[in-house]
Image (spheres, rainbow, N blue to C red):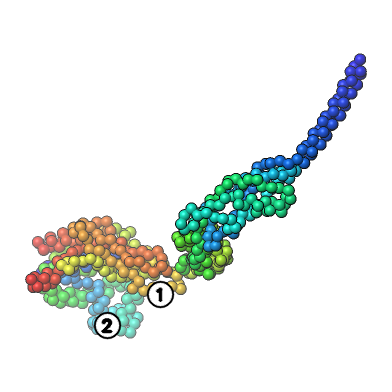
């Protein structure tokens, strides 16, 4: 079974693209959501995070994502540390997910930092959902009710699309002009034929 | 020689002036004498129609001036010609009225019936005047039935979009206290009358509800029981609210399943602080309609929504259109095959 990585910058619309694939019957693994789940539920991961970031990383049993975000989005070193704790656990979880859907024609692995975390190497093909920076900023501001500066700060922790484009096998343009569905269906068809 | 000539000219001029004076004096005497004689003359008089038949109102007024052929001495006639005349009251219902239509809305009367009454009216100011003839000889009246109705008052605001201060907005439409007035007037007008406007209020920079006495606009042929009402312009601070709401699908045939991307839309709107509590996601019903013609993937469906309460303003929906997939409803088709 083929494993397809799908990524895109913040506000690029990768969740919407994944929603379309899910409608086509393709299982979608949401790495970021699963990571949050693992952090909350896996005691080993939890302890490693507390050891690295202190007890404030958790407010009681609840993961203090705002506290962690403030640290890692301002320190690439700390971000790397967090990734080293979380990514192996997420990868193991993905393996389990793959086994569950072994009969699907292929499955998608959605991650915001697919290439940055080297997860792309474990995929058969990789899709980039791309949109102009200004549109991405606007969408994120609207979606998360945050300032332009906050969006830009988050963007800094992701590779720019220019760097990812040459590495991606497929690119979906989501610029509010070009329709998504024809692009998704076209890639879906190609993957099935590969 | 020269002095003689000047004294001759002076003498002639003096005689000439004396002559002219006596000519003028005799003309005046003649004129006064002439005015004592009796004459006949036509005098235009304004007229005011009073005492209309009960429950009737004039929908079309006949002539407002009558030409009276009168007989009197010259003095009286001269005064009547040059003085400013008060309208003569024409007591309509006191004369015989002839119907032109079965519903007695169109009638006529002969003005000669009014000779004596108008003469007595004239006599109040002129003792020696006699009306010989009145023109026109016939007056036509078009009446309308009088109707009373309670009619809503519409508070008019000049430039209603720009009356509030920043961060404030109208908290509902402007209204009046009382909200309606009793209007009396011709049946035909009252029947179609839906509102009485106030004189437009000129307001600006409002940051609180205002109460202002305002005059009602006088509409032709209508009488109101009140001439002024208290206009209320409700103003309140506003805030922006937003809801993420799932899209519903309309007119989808049983044999198909419609999938939209995204299937949730964000609705933002403005609402006053006092109405905030009343707003919930249930107020909004965004939907798309199953496409009847274009089944291709190269199109989008427009997101629509039903009407929202009038205290919600500046409703914006994002995205305005969504992409869609139509799937065959296998279960429904299987059931249909099974039923066959």
- Residue at screen point 33% across, 78% down: A64
Q: Are marks 2 and 1 in contact (CB under 8 Å)?
A: no
B262 and A132: which is toward the camera: B262
Q: Which mark is residue A47?
A: 2
Disc number lying in front (2 or 1): 1
Q: Quadrant of residue A47 in the image?
A: bottom left
Q: Tell me the chain of label 2.
A: A
Give the answer, above or below, for where A101 lies relative to A172: below
Quick check: can you spot residue A127? no
Q: Which residue is mark 1?
A: B278
Q: Quadrant of residue A133 in the image?
A: bottom left
Element at badge 1? Answer: helix
x, y percent for residue B145: 50, 60
Q: Is residue B302 left or right of residue B152?
A: left
- Residue at screen point 17% across, 66% down: B256
> Which quadrant would the C terminus of chain B be assigned to in this image?
bottom left
- Residue at screen point 68% across, 41% down: B40
x, y percent for residue B246: 28, 70
């Amino acid at each position: 079974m083929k494993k397809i990585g799908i990524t895109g910058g913040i506000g690029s619309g990768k969740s919407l693209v994944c929603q379309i694939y899910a409608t086509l019957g393709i299982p979608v693994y949401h790495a970021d959501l699963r990571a949050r789940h693992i952090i909350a539920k896996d005691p080993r991961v939890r302890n490693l995070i507390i050891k690295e970031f202190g007890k404030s990383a958790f407010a009681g049993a609840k993961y203090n994502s705002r506290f962690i975000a403030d640290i890692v989005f301002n320190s690439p070193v700390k971000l790397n540390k967090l990734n080293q704790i979380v990514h192996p656990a997420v990868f193991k979880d993905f393996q389990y997910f793959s086994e569950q859907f072994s009969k699907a024609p292929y499955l998608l692995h959605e991650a915001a930092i697919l290439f940055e975390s080297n997860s792309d190497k474990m995929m058969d093909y990789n899709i980039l959902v791309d949109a102009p920076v200004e549109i991405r900023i606007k969408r994120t501001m609207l979606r998360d009710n945050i300032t332009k500066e906050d969006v830009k700060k988050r963007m800094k922790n992701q590779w720019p699309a220019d760097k990812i484009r040459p590495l991606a096998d497929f690119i979906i343009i989501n610029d509010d002009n070009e329709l998504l569905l024809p692009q998704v269906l076209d890639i879906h068809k190609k993957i099935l034929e590969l | 020689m020269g002095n003689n000539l000047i004294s001759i000219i002076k003498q002639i001029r003096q005689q000439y002036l004396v002559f002219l004076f006596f000519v003028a004096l005799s003309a005046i005497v003649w004129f006064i004498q002439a005015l004592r004689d009796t004459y006949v003359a036509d005098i235009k008089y304004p007229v005011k129609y009073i005492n209309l038949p009960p429950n009737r109102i004039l929908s079309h007024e006949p002539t407002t001036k009558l030409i009276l052929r009168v007989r009197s001495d010259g003095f009286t006639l001269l005064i009547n010609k040059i003085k400013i005349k008060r309208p003569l009251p024409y007591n309509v219902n006191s004369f015989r009225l002839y119907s032109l239509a079965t519903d007695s809305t169109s009638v006529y009367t002969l003005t000669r019936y009014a000779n004596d009454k108008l003469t007595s009216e004239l006599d109040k100011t002129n003792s020696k005047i006699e009306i010989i003839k009145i023109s026109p000889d016939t007056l036509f009246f078009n009446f309308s039935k009088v109707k009373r109705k309670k009619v809503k008052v519409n508070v008019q605001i000049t430039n209603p979009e720009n009356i509030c201060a920043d961060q404030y907005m109208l908290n509902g439409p402007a209204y009046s206290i009382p909200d309606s007035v009793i209007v009396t007037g011709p049946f035909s007008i009252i029947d179609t009358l839906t509102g009485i406007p106030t004189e437009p209020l000129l307001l600006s920079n409002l940051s609180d509800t205002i109460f202002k006495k305002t005059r009602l606009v006088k509409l032709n042929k209508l009488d109101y029981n009140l001439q002024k009402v208290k206009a209320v312009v409700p103003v309140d601070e506003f805030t922006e609210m937003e809801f993420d709401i799932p899209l519903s699908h309309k007119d989808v045939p049983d044999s198909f399943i419609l999938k939209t991307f995204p299937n949730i839309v964000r609705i933002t709107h403005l609402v006053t602080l006092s109405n905030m509590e009343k707003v919930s996601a249930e107020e909004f019903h965004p939907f798309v309609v199953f496409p009847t013609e274009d089944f291709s993937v190269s199109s989008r469906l427009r997101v629509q929504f039903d009407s929202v309460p009038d205290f919600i303003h500046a409703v914006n929906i994002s995205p305005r259109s969504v992409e869609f997939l139509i799937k065959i409803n296998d279960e429904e088709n299987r059931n249909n095959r099974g039923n066959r």
